[in-house]
Image (spheres, rainbow, N blue to C red):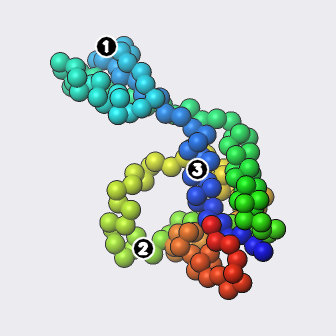
Amino acid sequence: MKALIDGDIVAYRCGFSGQHNHHEVMNLDGIVVYTTDFKREATAYVKKMDHPDRYEIYTSIEVEPIENILHSVKLMIEEIMANTGCTEHEIFITGTTNFRKELSTSYKANRDPNKKPVALPDIEEYLIKHHGAIRVEGEEAGKSDLLTEDEQHEWTL
């Protein structure tokens, strides 16, 4: 049996788990007065200050070595295969175009288009080179006709 895998889920989960945000609150003199891993905490700290307009929040992203992230991708695919009992898999990743965005500008408009895993291009390249992933143009991988048409009762993930 063949597992049909939405590679975007694999790429985003592993990519985000391999990076960590650090937020620093800095005053106008450039002195760091507060640090945290959570933006909401940094924002709350600034709001409590007498003059919140005198503080800026700077965010840095620490990314694990790509080898670690790609190993997580490999393990996730192996786990999917073990859990489904499948012996083969096909992975689909979203291309650059999506017909839903052409139909409505509000499609996923609440999502920050810049908030993607730093390692996403490397993960996608790995999925294509080492797992034969197919880049789906015109729609999302998880909603692809290739992924959802299940003629042979294959596993769809």
Identify the mark nearer the N-term, 3 or 1.
3
Hey, what amino acid is under mark 1? Asp
In this view of the protein, which residue sits in the foreground, 84 or 54? 84
In this view of the protein, which residue sits in the foreground, 154 or 49? 154
Hey, what amino acid is under mark 3? Arg
Q: Tell me the element at label 1.
A: loop
Percent position (x, y) of residue 136?
60, 71
Percent position (x, y) of residue 120?
60, 51
Q: Quadrant of residue 66?
A: top right
Question: Which residue is denoted by mark 2 in the rendering?
Answer: 100
Which residue shows up at 70% across the image and 46% down it?
72
Percent position (x, y) of residue 84?
72, 65
In this view of the protein, which residue sits in the foreground, 111 or 10? 10
Which residue shows up at 70% across the image and 77% down it?
154
Residue 86 - label: none
**Looking at the image, is mark 2 or mark 3 nearer the viewer?**
3
User: How far is the residue under mark 1 from the one under mark 2?
Assistant: 46 Å
